[in-house]
Amino acid sequence: MSALLDLRNVTVRYALNHGPRRRELTAVDDVSFTLESGEMLGLVGESGCGKSTLGRAILRLVPLAAGEVHWQGRRIDQLGRKEFRDLRRGLQLVFQDPHACLDPRMTIIESVAEPLRSFEPGLSRSQRAARATALLDEVGLASELSDRYPHQASGGQLQRAVIARALIVDPHLVVCDEPVSALDVSVQGQIVNLLARIRRERGLASLFIS
Ligand code: ADP
Ligand code: MG
């Protein structure tokens, strides 16, 4: 059985364009690990050491300079855009700043339901709304919050909404990039516990960056 996620000697470089000579910064240098279904892996390190870059590389948001990423036994770092799109729903990302992940013009329930438009185009509007409502309940958001806009909710509430939005497509893996660092200390523990509970209940694998 192949691992859910298998990183082999992954290296990522950024081009630094200032100055007369072209220089490069190696943000991720020869990283290898595997993650099995339902497993959690913590990625801990000081600021600037390349954690977010590694998360982005897994999701193909930055190109690899070297190495390979395998997902469910299949190499994905060189797949075409369309082929990757079909796999993409299995791999979701929760970012540090919930405000940046939610469209300020959409209500919370609209944002949570939105990924279903592209991933399950056969669903009706009311079916999408029903799925989103179930997810809001799963992440502990009161139903009266669902029709609010992001500016009308707290950071902790928004992060719950972002988690619901990531889960609504039933992923196999969530990459959580410092999901609580932008939140008040008092709610950080609640979100960490929520992520742990969801992982347990859903048998979801997670890569937890902190
Ligand atoms: P972390 O998440 O561990 O704080 P990052 O992955 O964000 O680290 O960044 C790793 C290194 O790459 C840092 O030195 C950062 O300044 C640099 N970096 C990040 N993004 C870019 C970019 N788009 N262009 C150039 N350098 C970048
Ligand atoms: Mg980071």
Image (cartoon, rainbow, N blue to C red):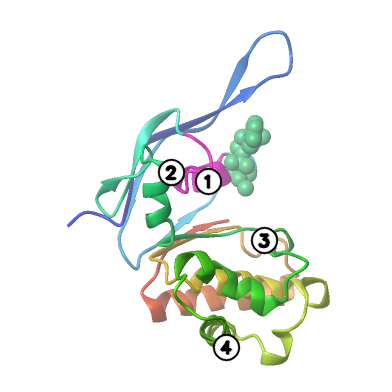
Q: For the residues carrying marks 3 and 2, which lies nearer the camera in this image?
A: 2
**Mark 1 residue type:** Arg
Cα distance between the residues tagged 3 and 2: 22 Å
Q: According to the image, label 1 marks what residue?
A: 56
Q: Earlier in the sequence, mark 1 or mark 4?
A: 1
Residues packed near mark 1 inside 10 Å, few (<14), some (14 to 19) or many (20 plus): some
Query: Do residues under tags 4 and 2 come within 8 Å of each other at their CB atoms?
Result: no
Q: Indicate the position of residue 143 as horizontal and vertical percent values.
A: 67, 91
**Mark 4 residue type:** Asp
Q: According to the image, label 4 marks what residue?
A: 137
Viewer-side residue, 189 vs 201: 201
Q: According to the image, label 3 marks what residue?
A: 101
Query: Do residues under tags 1 and 4 come within 8 Å of each other at their CB atoms?
Result: no
Q: Is mark 2 within 8 Å of ligand 1?
A: no
**Mark 2 residue type:** Arg
| Whether residue 120 is visible | yes
Residues packed near mark 3 inside 10 Å, few (<14), some (14 to 19) or many (20 plus): some
Q: For the residues carrying marks 2 and 1, which lies nearer the camera in this image?
A: 2
Cα distance between the residues tagged 4 and 3: 20 Å
Q: Earlier in the sequence, mark 4 or mark 2?
A: 2
